[in-house]
Image: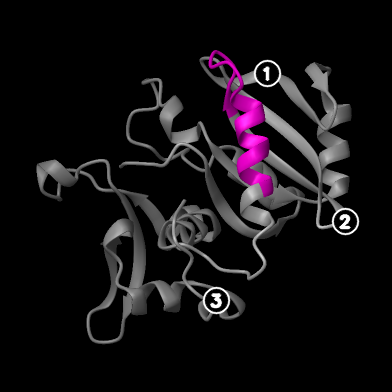
Amino acid sequence: MTLSPIRKVYQGIADRRQMFRMFDRHAQRPDRSLDDGALYCGEWFEIGQAEHDYMFEILPPLWIRGDMFALCEFRTGSITSVFFALTIDGRTRYFHGYCDLSVKGSPDRMRAAIIERESRPVQAMTREERLEHIWSSTHDHYRSYAGDRWAEHLCGSRTVLFYDGRQGSVLKLLDRLTDAEIAVKLPVHLRHLPDAIAA
């Protein structure tokens, strides 16, 4: 699975339940003993002010810098949660992202990418953002990773359960969903957003 360095993984504002669920949205990966920092590093999504403030109070921050703070508990290796309170188009919005603190300037690059993405005049989604939203919003029972029954080169690829009227429910590779299948899996309010060109 090839992932871009910084990527939005959920459309809309995640509530507390969804936020905690997305903190480990790769929980079902085949070998949790491996350091899968690349799966997490660069992921970000929007949260509400209450969720931002709750996370600020739950643990002492590792550091606080202006409009961001980092948690002292690490996800894996040198990757930890960084929370942002950013003024975009005249209003304060709140975000969570996974940054690799061993890479100098990682939180600042994440901050700049979020502001650039959320400052677009027309709300649009890239194909990658559509797929990431489907993965983030699909219940664990209906998403998984390709195992032994798949061709060897596909093992470990993300899959989602898809209902096809004639064949019933079948597992499909997430990154091979057609545009029509993606539209079916998205919530109604996201189905007709224009395509955005990936940065």
Asked whether, in this view, residue 132 is left or right of residue 52, the answer is: left
Query: Does label 3 or label 2 sit earlier along the sequence?
Result: 2
x 67%, y 55%: residue:
118
> Any magenta on residue 85?
no
Q: Secondary structure at mark 1?
A: strand
Asked whether, in this view, residue 74 is left or right of residue 27, the answer is: right
Mark 1 → mark 2, Cα distance in angstroms:
32 Å
Q: Secondary structure at mark 3?
A: loop
Q: Nearer the viewer, mark 3 or mark 2?
A: 2
Residue 167 position, x and y percent, is 22, 80
- Image quarter of the N terminus: top left
Query: Does label 1 or label 2 sit earlier along the sequence?
Result: 1
Residue corresponding to mark 3: 193
Query: Looking at the rendered structure, which numbered label has been put on residue 90?
Result: 2
Q: Is residue 62 above or below residue 118?
A: above
Range of residues picked out in magenta: 99-115
Residue 115 position, x and y percent, is 69, 47
Query: Looking at the rendered structure, which numbered label has been put on residue 73?
Result: 1
Residue closer to the observer: 138 or 117: 117
Residue closer to the observer: 18 or 119: 119
Q: Secondary structure at mark 2?
A: loop
- Label 2 sits on what residue type? Gly
Q: Are marks 3 and 1 in contact (CB under 8 Å)?
A: no
Q: Is residue 194 above or below residue 135?
A: below
- Label 1 sits on what residue type? Glu
Query: Does label 3 or label 1 sit earlier along the sequence?
Result: 1
Q: Nearer the viewer, mark 1 or mark 2?
A: 2
